[in-house]
């Protein structure tokens, strides 16, 4: 009895077979139509005309929020190298995390099923996809970092800083693309090794750049190290393609296809729910030894610990956002409104990751006829933990800023506390508005005819990101109010409006609301 082993086809034959499969799949309807590509291009054109062009024009006619030209060319690279290293670490870790959820090898489920059913090696049909998408990812990262640097700093205003700045952006783009693939194809242990190596390299580069007697080459060193890391990580990641777990890739592709369908139908929050981690563990911790449930605060803390990844992200974002928020509200130099807005957005993101109580509140409010009208204790049961956690995390970060800058100028401590408290209330109201979101309202799909065309797509985008829109708009309005007390009152009014709009989304009208609370 003889056994025959399958012989791997030559590379040219494998390439031709993969191309034939993709062409057959395209004829089946898998290729995007002209109309499907025209609508995103239309939205990008509207965004460019109404937002990007005015912002670029304002930047070109006004000083940059963060100036680097005022610093001498000798000392600037040494002082900027730690910031560049921190940005490179954040981009690399973000690419790894994105690869674990939606990596470059995610394709259409049917096409992946057809290719998996053949005798081709995964490296033959996944290698080309990975190379093309990594090139796209590197280009997008380069453009995004370059645009942010142009809009926020005057880095490109002088030839002495523009050339090393471009080198830094190229190095960050290279390591971001390689880390994106590494995060998907390598095991969790390998990802932790890469994350530790990147963090250690950033510390070494920052230390060397800070202690060098001549800091002119600080940015060049900060650009060279990420580029070398990207070159060192890329080949091992591609060599791991033949041994990739195809079953896990099929599950990721199916989930990505479902999420893409949700996004195209206007329900982005449903797409994000597909990537929400499943709670696990600590089930018995919700109950005391006598059989009764624990307190509201303890229940929320236990439910947060059941999703440790989200809880850890919230534990990092809330203090960091609170520190940035306090730094901007105190009126520090270097664009305080930018610090204020960035800190508020960070606290807003962290407020959604402190636990699953927001989602439970939405479900209970939308199922009121099933669960009954007696819901007086429902807000307390659901909102005690997120309110306490967000407030404590924000003021912890603010306390750290106050310790480093204490004492504050006369009369500024009280106004800072009012602005921070008002911003926290505004963030909680915006989070309530976002979490009470259900299906896409049909009236948003009605055309909005203007001289520039139909703007209904912008309404849909604003509805998708209504929480962030409310936070940024509220911070801009609070910054325009001259009095801290008036700004805090304005934030409370905006939060109350968000709560009312959120209740209307769940079907709870204003009439009879107080009566329901009294009956509860």
Image (cartoon, helix red, strand yellow):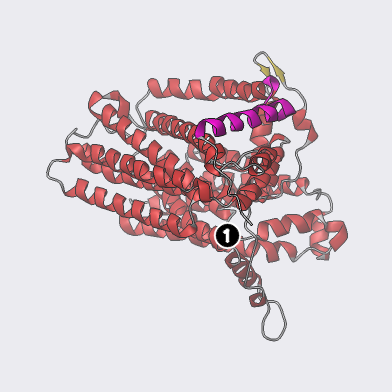
Q: Is residue 517 visible?
A: yes
Q: Does 447 sit above or below residue 173?
A: above
Please state the horizontal and vertical placement of residue 50, each as a whole percent of the image. 56, 22
Identified at 63% across, 54% down, the residue is: 276
Left or right position of 121 against 240: right
Left or right: 323 with respect to 28?
A: left
Quadrant, the N terminus: bottom right
Instruction: Please provide percent x and percent y for residue 191.
Output: 44, 55
Residue 29, percent from left and from top = 73, 28
Q: Position of residue 219 (x, y in %)?
A: 25, 38
Q: What kind of secondary structure does the magenta stretch mostly adopt?
A: helix
**Pointer 1 local density, CA inside 10 Å: few below 14, some 14–19, many at least 20:** many
Identify whether 178 is placed above or below 21: below
Residue ID for mark 1: 354
Q: Residue at x 52, y 30 (%)?
A: 12
Which residue is the extreme one toward the left?
213
330 vs 51: above or below = below
Tell whether position 20 is magenta.
yes
Q: Which portion, as a residue range, is magenta?
A: 11-35
Residue placed farthest to the top in the image?
Answer: 451
């Amino acid at each position: 009895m003889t056994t025959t082993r399958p012989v791997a086809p030559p590379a040219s034959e494998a390439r031709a077979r993969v191309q034939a499969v993709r062409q057959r799949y395209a004829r089946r309807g898998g290729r995007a139509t002209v109309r499907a590509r025209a609508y995103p291009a239309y939205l990008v054109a509207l965004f460019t005309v109404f937002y990007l062009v005015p912002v670029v024009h304002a930047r070109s006619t006004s000083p940059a929020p963060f100036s680097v030209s005022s610093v001498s060319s000798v000392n600037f690279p040494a002082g900027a190298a730690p910031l560049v290293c921190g940005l490179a670490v954040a981009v690399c870790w973000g690419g790894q995390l994105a690869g674990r959820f939606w990596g470059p090898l995610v394709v259409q489920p049917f096409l992946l099923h057809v290719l998996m059913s053949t005798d081709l090696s995964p490296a033959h049909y996944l290698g080309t996809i990975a190379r093309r998408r990594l090139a796209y990812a590197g280009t997008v990262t380069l453009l995004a970092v370059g645009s942010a640097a142009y809009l926020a700093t005057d880095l490109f205003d002088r030839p002495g800083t523009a050339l090393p700045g471009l080198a830094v952006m190229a190095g960050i783009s290279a390591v971001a693309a390689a880390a994106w693939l590494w995060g998907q194809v390598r095991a969790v242990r390998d990802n932790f090794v890469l994350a530790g190596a990147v963090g250690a390299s950033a510390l070494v580069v920052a230390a060397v750049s800070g202690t060098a007697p001549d800091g002119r080459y600080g940015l060049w060193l900060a650009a060279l190290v990420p580029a070398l890391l990207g070159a060192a990580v890329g080949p091992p990641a591609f060599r791991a393609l033949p041994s990739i777990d195809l079953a896990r890739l099929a599950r990721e592709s199916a989930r990505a296809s479902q999420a893409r369908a949700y996004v195209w139908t206007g329900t982005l929050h449903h797409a994000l729910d597909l990537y929400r981690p499943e709670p696990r563990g600590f089930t018995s911790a919700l109950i005391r030894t006598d059989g009764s449930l624990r307190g509201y605060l303890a229940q929320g803390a236990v439910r947060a610990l059941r999703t440790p990844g989200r809880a850890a992200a919230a534990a990092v974002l809330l203090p960091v956002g609170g520190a940035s928020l306090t730094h901007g509200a105190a009126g520090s130099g270097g664009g305080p409104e930018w610090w204020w807005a960035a800190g508020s957005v960070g606290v807003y993101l962290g407020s959604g990751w402190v636990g699953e109580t927001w989602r439970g509140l939405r479900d209970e409010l939308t199922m009121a006829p099933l669960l009954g009208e007696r819901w007086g204790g429902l807000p307390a049961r659901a909102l005690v933990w997120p309110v306490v956690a967000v407030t404590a995390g924000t003021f912890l970060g603010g306390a750290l800023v106050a310790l480093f800058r204490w004492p504050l100028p006369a009369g500024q401590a009280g106004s800072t506390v009012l602005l921070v408290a008002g911003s926290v209330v505004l963030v909680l109201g915006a989070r309530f508005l976002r979490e009470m979101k259900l299906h896409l309202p049909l009236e948003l799909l009605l055309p909005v005819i203007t001289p520039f065309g139909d703007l209904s797509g912008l309404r849909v985008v604003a509805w998708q990101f209504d929480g962030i829109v409310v936070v940024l708009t509220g911070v801009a309005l609070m910054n325009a109010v001259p009095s801290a007390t008036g700004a805090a009152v304005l934030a409370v009014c905006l939060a109350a409006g968000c709560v009312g709009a959120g209740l209307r989304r769940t079907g709870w009208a204003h009439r009879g609301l107080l009566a329901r609370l009294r009956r509860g």
